[in-house]
């Protein structure tokens, strides 16, 4: 009992003496959604590899999740271009993050089309396609809205969709929602990258009480 008390007291003293690492302050366009949005969960086809993947395949990486389609005129390409800039700012640690582009137009976004499209924006981009049920379930999970407007030409129709980027930590927990990235005149690229770097380099630590309990 005395030995456990000494160990616990020593651990508390050591932790108190350690410098506190301060994460970069997230820019105003990054809304903190921790605890408000469910963890990352899905099952879809990775068009880059051709295989079925789930959220578990990306554990250990910071995940940026976005819903869009390849025929999108502005929001989607501008969002991906700016995410590409964010990855450039991340430097070497960029390999510990990934951007998942979920198509809301799987009819036209065939695997070859989607693979080519996301590939235009760099190696950290992965295109995902799912069955109608998988797509709708994932959209509902994160309150994403999208719709298809009918057209006389079955290949020429309009798709509308939400344009937020959801950010998940290495453990799959929702952390931020990035707004207006595709339409902002001067998006805070460096600040977004700094916040993501904090998630990559400083993942949540094991609670202190759990650590002390393990001494018993």
Image: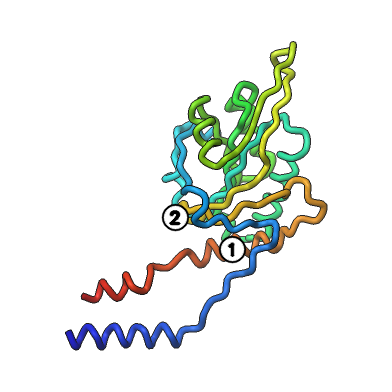
Residue at (71, 53) in percent of width and height: 85
User: Disc 2 marks which residue?
Assistant: 171
Can residue 49 be seen at all in this image of the molecule? Answer: no
Q: Image height check: is 38 above or below 11?
A: above
**Left or right side of 143 for 147:** right
Q: Earlier in the sequence, mark 1 or mark 2?
A: 2
Residue 138, position as x, y percentages in the image? 51, 36
User: Disc 1 marks which residue?
Assistant: 197
Residue at (66, 32) in percent of width and height: 69
Observer-nearest of 85 and 191: 191
Secondary structure category for the residue under label 1: helix
Residue at (25, 88) in percent of width and height: 6
**Left or right side of 13 for 21:** right
Q: Quadrant of the N terminus?
A: bottom left
Q: Image height check: is 132 above or below 25?
A: above
Tags 1 and 2 in contact by the CB under 8 Å rule? no
- Which numbered dot is residue 174? none
- Please tell me in which quadrant of the rendered image residue 107 appears: top right
Mark 1, mark 2: which one is toward the viewer? 2
Mark 1 and mark 2: Cα distance apart in space? 15 Å
Q: How many marks?
A: 2
Residue 118, position as x, y percentages in the image? 64, 38
Mark 1 Cα shell of 10 Å, populated few (<14), some (14-19), many (≥20): many
Residue 55, position as x, y percentages in the image? 45, 43
Can residue 105 be seen at all in this image of the molecule? Answer: yes
């Amino acid at each position: 009992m005395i030995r456990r008390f000494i160990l616990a007291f020593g651990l508390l003293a050591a932790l108190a003496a350690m410098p506190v690492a301060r994460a970069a302050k997230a820019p105003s366009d990054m809304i903190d959604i921790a605890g408000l949005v469910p963890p990352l969960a899905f099952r879809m086809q990775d068009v880059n590899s051709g295989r079925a993947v789930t959220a578990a395949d990306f554990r250990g990486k910071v995940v940026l999740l976005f819903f869009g389609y390849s025929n999108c005129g502005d929001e989607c390409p501008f969002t991906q271009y700016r995410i590409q800039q964010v990855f450039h700012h991340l430097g070497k640690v960029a390999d510990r993050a990934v951007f998942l582009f979920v198509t809301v137009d799987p009819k036209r976004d065939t695997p070859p089309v989607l693979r080519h499209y996301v590939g235009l924006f760099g190696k950290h981009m992965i295109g995902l396609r799912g069955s109608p049920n998988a797509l709708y379930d994932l959209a509902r999970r994160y309150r994403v809205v999208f719709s298809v407007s009918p057209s006389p030409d079955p290949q020429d129709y309009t798709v509308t969709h939400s344009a937020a980027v959801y950010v998940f930590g290495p453990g799959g927990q929702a952390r931020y929602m990035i707004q207006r990235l595709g339409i902002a005149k001067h998006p805070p690229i460096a600040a977004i990258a700094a916040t993501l770097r904090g998630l990559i380099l400083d993942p949540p630590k094991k609670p202190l009480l759990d650590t002390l309990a393990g001494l018993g």
